[in-house]
Image: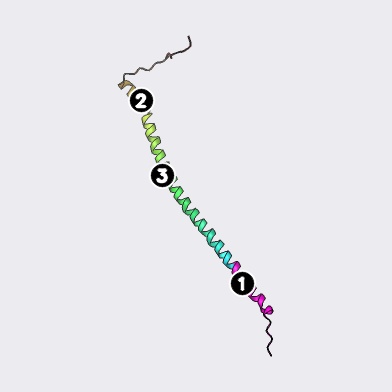
Amino acid sequence: MTIIKPQKNNWHSKFFLLVFLLLFLGAVFYIKEYNQLANGRYELENLKKVIAQLEEKNNDLKNELFKFTDPKRLSDLAQEKALVLERHPQYFNLNP
């Protein structure tokens, strides 16, 4: 006669199920974290490229501004427009 005791073998299946569940959840968590890290690195590289382009554009704008405000160019423009440099300018006053 064979006596089967299902309760005795049940803890093995629960243990393996728990281990498998922990490994599965760990793998899902690892994949999620890795994807976030990869996306972060990709965004960082894109932002570095954008910053480099903006710095280049900023430098070009600064060069143009300095070119327009060059004292030699401004004095030539003043002579061309027949402007005179006032040493002691008098300003309008609203108070009598």
Q: Marks 2 and 3: which is nearer the front?
A: 3
C-alpha span from label 3 to label 1: 54 Å
Identify residue for label 3: 53
**Quadrant of the image containing the N terminus:** bottom right
Identify residue for label 2: 74
Residue at horizontal 41%, vertical 39%? 58
Q: Toward the viewer: 31 or 91?
A: 31
The x, y position of residue 94, in whole percent, is 46, 13
Q: Specify the principal SS of the magenta part.
A: helix
Q: Amino acid at mark 1?
A: Leu
Identify residue for label 1: 17
Whether tag 3 and tag 1 are in contact, CB under 8 A, the answer is no
Indicate which disc, 3 or 1, sits on the residue closer to the N terminus: 1
Q: Toward the viewer: 78 or 37?
A: 37
Q: Amino acid at mark 2?
A: Leu
Estimate how packed mark 2 is, as few (under 14), some (14 to 19) or many (20 or more) residues with alpha carbons within 10 Å.
few
